[in-house]
Amino acid sequence: MRITLLLLFALSVSACRQAGAGAAKVLNANAFEKVLAEDRSAQLVDVRTAAEFANSHLNGAKLISINEAGFAEKIGQLDKNRPALVYCASGSRSAAAADQMTKMGFKTVYDLEGGINAWRATGKQVVR
C-alpha cells in the first residue's frame, strides 16, 4: 500500500513538473529542426564533451559541456529571454542541462529527444 501511494505521488509530481510553466519542452528531431529553422534568435547548445563535439555536431551549435567545471557560469552568459535549444548524444545530459537552465530563469528551453543520435537516425545532417 505504501509503495503504491509513493509511486502515485512520484508520478503526479513528475507529471506536474513536465507540464508546469518554465519546464523544458522535449521535442523530437523534426520539431527541433522546425524551431531552429523558424526562430533565428534561438541559441543552439551542445552539452556533450569537446571530443564528441569535434566528431560531429549540429550546424551552428555552441559547445558548453555539462561535464566541465563552470557549466552554470557559461550557460548563464546566454540570453535567458531568447529560446535555447539543447542536445547531447541520447538525451540524458541535455535533460539535466535543460532542467538547470529553466531553474536559472531561461524563458524557453527546448530539449532534443534522443539527442544527436535521434537526429542522425532521421537522416538529418551534422557537421563533421
Image (spheres, grey):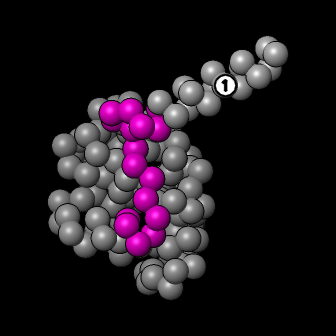
The reply to whether residue 74 is visible in this rendering is no
Residue 88 against residue 57 in the figure, above or below:
above
Which residue is pictured at 33% across the width and 33% down the height? 21
Residue 124 percent location from the top left of the image? 45, 82
Residue 44 percent location from the top left of the image? 33, 61
The residue stretch that appears in magenta? 17-32
Number of marks in picture = 1
Residue 9 against residue 52 in the figure, above or below:
above
Quadrant location of residue 19? top left
From the viewer's perspective, tell me whether residue 78 is left or right of residue 27: left
Amino acid type assigned to the residue bearing label 1 in the image: Leu
Name the residue that disc number 1 marks. Answer: 8
Quadrant location of residue 52? bottom right
Residue 111 percent location from the top left of the image? 44, 54
On whether residue 114 falls in the magenta region, the answer is no
Q: Nearer the viewer, residue 37 or 47?
A: 37
Image quarter in which the N terminus is found = top right
From the viewer's perspective, tell me whether residue 59 is left or right of residue 6: left
Which residue is pictured at 30% across the width and 70% down the height? 34
